[in-house]
Image (cartoon, grey):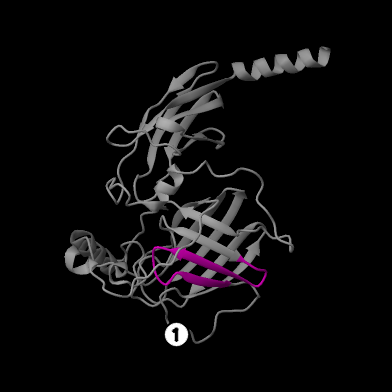
Amino acid sequence: MRFAIVVCLLAVRVLAQTGSLSGTVTDPDGGGVPTAPVQARNVATGEVYKSVAIAKGSYTLSKLPAGIYDITVPPIGFTFNKYEQKGVTIQAAKSSRLDIRLGWSGNLGTPGDDFSLLIRQGSKTSPTGRAPRGRDGKLDLSGVWIGNAPDVDAPEMLPWVEEITKQRRARGTGNPGESCLPGDILLVSPFIYKIIQTPAVIALLWEGNVPGIVQIFLDGRAHPKNLDPSWMGHSVGRWDGDTLVVDTVGFNDRSWLRVFPHTEMLHVTQRYRRPELGHIEKEVTIDDPGAFRKPWKIRDGWDLAPGEEIAEYICNENEKDVPHLK
């Protein structure tokens, strides 16, 4: 009995030292955004607390230690840009409120034009639990995943890259993907991805962009000495603890990095982590001394999509986009 009383007193004391934050997540038109992930990072400790908006967009972050927090909603598909509110104060034993209004992203809220968002809204939240491991003890990244719009650093461009980038942004078109060529060689788009993992090789499939497959060799081989430049390059991987490190070289200079050009000196390093069952964290480092003053990074998150599967994607016949985009 005495032990139970002590536990209860400790629980009351902890609750007295914590507060909560709640509100609604809405789109620019005021509609609720269910399944939107809301994160609160304690500025002092770096600890991140997570919640997911439910029906009509309401969310609650409870048991937050008193302090200052940065509140974010990561980019969601092609539909919503990243949201961030810094310096939110949480007081002990008090409830605070923050209503979040998201901004439209690339598709400007066009109904049915973001399959990744439709999948999220039509499903339950990503499953929780410990990430699985294979028979070799390595972290198992296998599964079907939904990508989010990435968090992209601002690269320090060389003058020729800055000029071409300015022209591309003014024109608003011209990406190779508009002509049925690879439009995202870094795989950081809100597409559906599938990872098939074996000890010797990983096959990464995706839907919504050609060529739809890349191989990551894990058998210890090196890059070939005389690589013919290609759209997706040549990838070899190794495990650094629970992080899959993928090294890719051998790119041609015809693809775009988002909107930026690059040279055949492009060297990409990707790091994949699966901190829990339902999520993959992906970090991409871009190094091209012929185009940028120093390496820069892109960070992306993939959510597990139980029950989903990769579908056939064809983009090589009767191409009609380009004439209408000019």
Is any atom of residue 149 visible in this view? no
Report whether 312 appears left or right of 275: left
Q: In this figure, which residue is indicated by the disc labeled 1?
A: 228
Q: Residue at x 66, y 15 (%)?
A: 12
The reply, left or right, for residue 316 in relation to residue 274 is left
Residue 165, horizontal then vertical, whole percent: 26, 63
Of residues 254 and 294, the one drawn nearer to the viewer in this rendering? 254
Residue 306 screen position, x and y as percent: 55, 51
The residue located at (52%, 41%) in the rendering is 125
Is residue 62 within the magenta segment? no
Query: How many labels sit on residues?
Result: 1
With respect to residue 182, does 48 lie above or below? above
Please report the residue visible at 77 percent of the width from the left and 12 percent of the height from the top: 5
In which quadrant will I find the N terminus? top right
Q: Is residue 203 left or right of residue 263?
A: right
User: Closest to the observer: 36 or 7?
Assistant: 36
In the foreground, 34 or 240: 34
Magenta range is 197-216
Q: Classify mark 1: helix, strand or loop.
A: loop
Locate residue 242: give its quadrant: bottom right
Q: Please tell me which residue lies in front, 203 or 153.
A: 203
Identify which amino acid the numbered label 1 is placed on: Asp
Q: Is residue 93 visible?
A: yes
Q: Is residue 148 left or right of residue 254?
A: right
> Residue 24 appears at what percent x and percent y?
40, 29
Which secondary structure is most common in the magenta stretch? strand
Depicted 119 relative to depicted 263: above or below: above
Check the image and report above or below for 244 versus 31. Answer: below
The quarter of the displayed image where residue 162 is located: bottom left
- Residue 212 within the magenta-colored segment of the rendering: yes
Q: How would you rate the neighbour count of disc 1 (Cα within 10 Å): few for under 14, some for 14-19, many for 20 or more? A: few
